[in-house]
Amino acid sequence: MREITYTLLGDGTSDKALLPIINWTIRKWHPDVLIQAQWADFSRLPVPPKSLPDRMKQALELYPCDWLFVHRDAEKQPVNDRQSEIEEAWKSIGSSYTAHTVVGITPVRMTEAWLLLEEKAIRLAASNPSGKQPLVLPSLKMLESVTDPKHTLQQLLREASGLNQRRLQKFNVSKATQLVAEMIDDFAKLEELTAFNAFEQHFVRATTIN
């Protein structure tokens, strides 16, 4: 069995939630590959890199890998523009890293939009799997139109926890957000989304294994 090490370079710590999604995608297209996942953490560096090319170089140097996944939230920019930004940054440094493969991953808004899939996963992440509080999740076709997916997911987690206002003050919503992705076994529903399809197609083109 071939082992593949990949590194995820995100915009912020909340993007760690993409790791289970990437793992699921790799297993779908390369089921015989052993996956070693890494998160590019620059928080302890005295001077973290700022530009995208410098961040990519630093990620490859500190977290050696076969595949580098680069996350950029599209937010107000078209997904294709963000993808082009990643490709241009890679071209500017690629001559020194020809042994690596880079894959862009760009949700339309924020990473959290891809986590608004399962009520069960949200209840589990909120440590209240048997909760009866009604949760209103956006429909799948509306996920890419949610204005602030992070706020929406965090609010759903708070509601799902069933905690009163006093206990909610100690509820770690950031940790719970990370757990949502880990509680989802199947991300196939994401294939109905334009941005995820773009990511998956790019991934397939870029990661052909000889």
Image (cartoon, grey):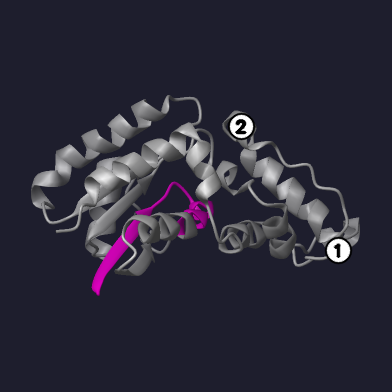
Identify the residue under disc 2: 141
Tell me if residue 62 can be seen.
yes
Q: Residue at x 80, y 56 (%)?
A: 160
Where does the image place residue 178, in percent across and percent down from the top left?
58, 59
Q: Quadrant of residue 59?
A: bottom left
Where does the image place residue 137, in percent across and percent down from the top left?
73, 42
Q: Residue at x 28, y 66 (%)?
A: 5
User: Quick check: 171 left or right of 73?
Assistant: right
Q: Nearer the viewer, residue 21 or 13?
A: 21
Name the amino acid type tagged 2: Lys
Q: Nearer the viewer, residue 171 or 135?
A: 135
Tell me if residue 51 can be seen.
no
Name the amino acid type tagged 1: Arg
Residue 118: mark? none
Residue 5 is one of the magenta-drawn residues:
yes
Q: Residue at x 31, y 60 (%)?
A: 30
Magenta segment: 1-19
Proximity of marks 1 and 2: CB atoms separated by less than 8 Å? no
Q: Quadrant of residue 42?
A: bottom left
Mark 2 or mark 1, which is nearer the start of the sequence? 2
80 lies above or below 203? above
Residue 34 is one of the magenta-drawn residues:
no
- Badge 1: residue crowd in 10 Å (few <14, some 14–19, many ≥20): few
Identify the residue under disc 1: 167
User: Quick check: 175 left or right of 189?
Assistant: right
- Badge 2: residue crowd in 10 Å (few <14, some 14–19, many ≥20): few
Count how many numbered circles sit on residues in the image: 2
Where does the image place residue 133, in percent across and percent down from the top left?
87, 53
Q: CA distance from mark 1 to mark 2?
A: 34 Å
